Amino acid sequence: MLKIKCPFCGVRDESEFSCGGEAHIARPTTDLKLTDKIFSEYLFMKYNPKGVFLERWCHTSGCRRWFNLARDTVSHEIIEIYPMGVFPKTVKGKKAYQANWRRKSKYEAVSKPAKRTKK
Amino acid sequence: MAKLNIDRGTRAFTRKSKRYSIFSIAKNAASYHQKWQQAWRHAEPKSTYDAVIIGGGGHGLATAYYLANIHGITNIAVIEKGWLGGGNTGRNTTIIRSNYMWDESAAIYEHALKLWEGLSQDLNFNVMFSQRGVLTISHSEHELKGMSRRVHAIRLNGIDSDILSPSEIKKLVPTINIDPNIRYPVMGGFIQKRAGTARHDAVAWGYARAADELGVDIIQNCEVTGLRRNGNQITGIQTTKGFVKTSKVGCVVAGHSSIIADMANIRLPITSRPLQAIVSEPIKPILDTVIMSNAVHMYISQSDKGEMVLGAGVDKYNSYAQTGSWTIPEHMVAAAIDLFPFLSQLRMLRQWGGIVDTCPDASPIISKTDVKGLYFNCGWGTGGFKATPGSGHVFADLIANDRPNPIALPFGLKRFETGYLIDEHGAAGVAH
Ligand SMILES: Cc1cc2nc3c(=O)[nH]c(=O)nc-3n(C[C@H](O)[C@H](O)[C@H](O)COP(=O)(O)OP(=O)(O)OC[C@H]3O[C@@H](n4cnc5c(N)ncnc54)[C@H](O)[C@@H]3O)c2cc1C
Ligand SMILES: [Zn+2]
């Protein structure tokens, strides 16, 4: 059983939370131009490491708010808890972010909002 | 639904001297069972193989056995990082059935069930396949309606499936409470009578012994740590016992599939989650069928030793620790007691977890990859034990002929690009 420190409510038992899976998956912005293969990487393929994993959790039976968690999938050690919309700060958390294959994927390269061309 | 003639192979156990039989038992009894031959050799890796199977679970061993027995490819090795069947094969609750709704699933699970029906003879090893029936009960009008739709779909594929009324269920399972005024009233159910259970370790051992007999090297305590490729072609594997040259690699590592895929820089839609089971202290025989309830979310059977075997759904987060969270067994036991109140008197003996390879559509992957000579068989998640013979059978065919046969074809990785998913989550809605 994990003990998770909700950033809003404090330490609670795992059973109060639900896990929302992998964090920091960016949606491709130029979908219509993507091949099915590249879009399927975004939609279906998973980063499934044996080691530090960045994931989203929600305090469903509490404040119902979302946050991010860096957790080791072997020891279950919680390394870092950080807000939605920001990146991990710990060394292990940063490394886990970079180790994810998505950082080098074709789809993520087109998931940043396209730059407007000047008229 | 796709159907294939079941080729059981002809090459195994042609040497009578090695067969188990009533005579070999009598002969060995005379020497106080001190002289039984080794079931399989203790092999060390050779430098080159025609094909290597990674993972010595049931699926990997079955693949090797059928490669040798049907396709005559015998210069092969099964490489296992721990001991045979120490993964999910030896951790599962052994439910076997083929009553799936989609045609693609029905085809592969029924293919497997047909192989199960002759497996002990094929392997000359008693896998204790017991067709005791799997009964799924329903607790509401709506569930019952959904069930009858499923039963008819399953029957259209020629697979046995019957609806039972509460009184018929009571006759089959005298310990069940069919009073309509309980919290989860039993409104009816459906049964596959040809379904049942088998002895998990025996499946691994039986396949290992038969494959070894055909010359397959079974290498334990040897972990695959890397894949080597030349351009787009697999050329070998790196292991803790050195480099092994081969041009065909079949990966059958269940919860560790993503780790091997990473070595080849390919992507899989797999997440690794713990799935748990518990068994009680042994009691006298009271339940000779398998019972599942989707609404209460548990399933239960009684082992030959007399233990009540309980299982439920997967844990909610990714993990490679073969334990799982305590909340799951807590729910499992609560659900079991709702259904069978007398269980509250029992002490639970053991709890464990296995790391299952769940797939977005709850269907397996039996596929070639973008790397030539690299094949994956994974994604069986919470319910692959029942498929063991069928999975090995079609995977061996894929590796030998470098093309999927009609049963394996729908389970390719391509389905995640084409959108042709085989959504068993929605269709069956049952675990295992
Ligand atoms: C608790 C539980 C209950 C279940 N109940 C049922 C059920 O009732 N019915 C059903 O049909 N299914 C059930 N399942 C699912 C079923 O157990 C699996 O789908 C099936 O056994 C998978 O078999 P496998 O041979 O593919 O995998 P495994 O038996 O897990 O074999 C994979 C092997 O690969 C090895 N390996 C991993 N990485 C490496 C490496 N790098 N190098 C070398 N070897 C490696 C592992 O050590 C392991 O032995 C259950 C699973 C669990 C955990
Ligand atoms: Zn909270």
Image (cartoon, helix red, strand yellow):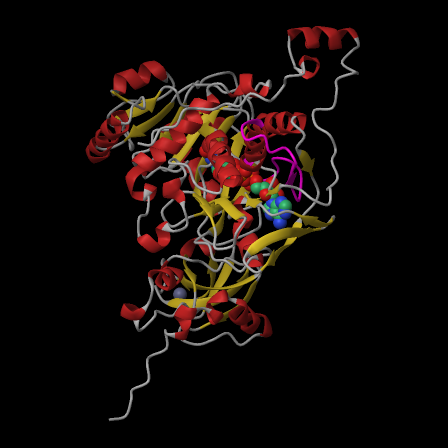
Residue at screen point 60% across, 18% down: B124
Q: How many marks?
A: 0
**Overall secondary structure of the magenta section:** loop
User: Image height check: is A86 above or below A70?
Assistant: below
Q: Where is residue B46 drawn, in percent x and y?
A: 73, 42
Identify the residue at the far bottom of this view. Answer: A119
User: Where's the C terminus of chain B, which quadrant?
Assistant: top left
Q: Where is residue B6 drawn, in percent x and y?
A: 44, 24
Query: Would residue B54 appear left or right of B290 to someone viewing this image?
Result: right
Q: Is residue B340 visible?
A: no
Q: Is residue B79 magenta?
A: yes
Q: Is residue B142 visible?
A: yes
Task: Decide which of A35, B431 is in the foreground and name it.
Answer: A35
Q: Locate residue B66: give its quadrant.
A: top right
The quarter of the image that holds ligand 2 is: bottom left
Residue at screen point 35% across, 50% down: B415
Q: Where is residue B215 drawn, in percent x and y?
A: 67, 30
Q: Is residue B374 magenta?
A: no
User: Image height check: is B285 above or below B369?
Assistant: above
Query: Would residue B9 appear left or right of B241 to someone viewing this image?
Result: left
Residue at screen point 53% across, 72% down: A98
Residue at screen point 35% across, 65% down: A63
Q: Which residues are magenta?
A: B69-89
Task: Decide which of B408, A107 is in the foreground and name it.
Answer: B408
Query: Would residue A44 appear left or right of A31 to someone viewing this image?
Result: right
Q: Where is residue B250 drawn, in percent x and y?
A: 55, 44
Task: Decide which of B362, B213 is in the foreground and name it.
Answer: B213
